[in-house]
Amino acid sequence: MYKRSAWPCLGFSFIGSDIGGFAEQPNGELYARWIQLGVFHPFCRTHSSGDHGEQEPWMFGDEVTDVVRKFIELRYQLLPYLYTSFRHYLNQGTPMLKSLVLYDQHDIQTHYRTDEFIFGSQMLVCPILEPNSKGRRLYVPKGIWYDYWKNESFQGGKEVWVDATLDSMPIFVKAGAIIPKYPIQQYVGEIEVDQVTLDIYYKKGKEHSDLYDDAHDGYDYTKGRYSLRHFKLTGKSNELIIQQHKSGKYISPFKTFKLNLIGLPFEIKKIEIDNVEVLYKDIKFTKNQAMIIDKDFTELHIM
């Protein structure tokens, strides 16, 4: 399903840079910032000629190693979101990394913003490009957005300053988005994924999200052996409704969803799954109050 090229080519979405630089050696700060950007590129690898010094993450000290580990683990968590973005690119031809003007061409403030981008369709990534930076100014598109690290929502359509120490980079999520995530792993296939986390960002109104899966190899997806889950979120002042429509012949190996409800403006008093009320005490919760339910629900009401 991927277009397998390591080099940036017109019309190809599976591209990325040689993180760290192919020639010459970066300092630790530049390497860390480059990793933070690179993990959001469709093709992600560190690479060099090998003639300009060692360039592995651990060659820059413990602080840089910890930063690199944090963001590479984030990359592995976001693999289902990335894979779904590949599916949209393949079927619709939309870039996996979108300029702000492509995201909202009617907002004139997006027209000349070249150092921020939309990752997939619902995440805003704002890399740090200057040395010794403690943050940066950036433009957040119109609408409600959540700070990925703090889970705090705010109104976009304005320029803001965001603090960002070396171990952080400004990342935002569109309100209403449902972001699928895998458990942290050190390489693809290290563990059998039996649960997918859905980070659900509350929005008053409607929003649509997708989760695509297949065998991850071969071309059976062209014969309908894929799984496409389409989520419709409807948020009200005292209720959150999530509807799921499934298509495709592939049965994903995971059994449950873990739902992280972010920004919910009301206290949960009642839960219905497929029109059947489920007692609050019968819902399985994790320590951080995430809800675990069967993956094949059709409609979830949280009230």
Image (cartoon, rainbow, N blue to C red):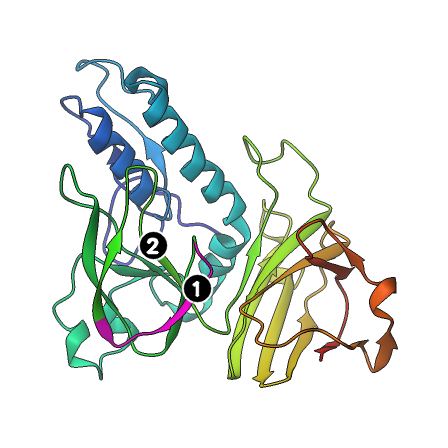
Q: 269 or 200, which is in the foreground?
A: 269
In the displayed structure image, the side of residue 225 where residue 155 appears, left or right? left
Which element carries disc 2, helix, strand or loop?
Answer: loop
**Residue at disc 1, secondary structure:** loop
Residue neighbourhood size for the residue with mark 1, other residues' Cα within 10 Å, grouped as few (<14), some (14–19), many (≥20)? few
Quarter of the picture containing the C terminus is bottom right
Which residue: 72% across, 63% down?
Answer: 249
Q: 19 or 34, which lies in front?
A: 34
Q: Quadrant of residue 237?
A: bottom right
Q: Is residue 151 magenta?
A: yes
The CA distance from mark 2 to mark 1 is: 31 Å
Against 294, residue 54 (above or below) is above
Q: Which residues are magenta?
A: 150-158
Q: Residue at x 50, y 50 (%)?
A: 78
Q: In the image, residue 290 lies at what x, y percent?
A: 68, 57
Q: Which residue is mark 1?
A: 152
The image's mark for residue 13 is 2
The amino acid at mark 2 is Ser
Which amino acid type is shown beneath numbered disc 1?
Answer: Glu
Look at the image and tell me whether residue 153 can be seen: yes
The residue mark sitting in front, 2 or 1, is 1
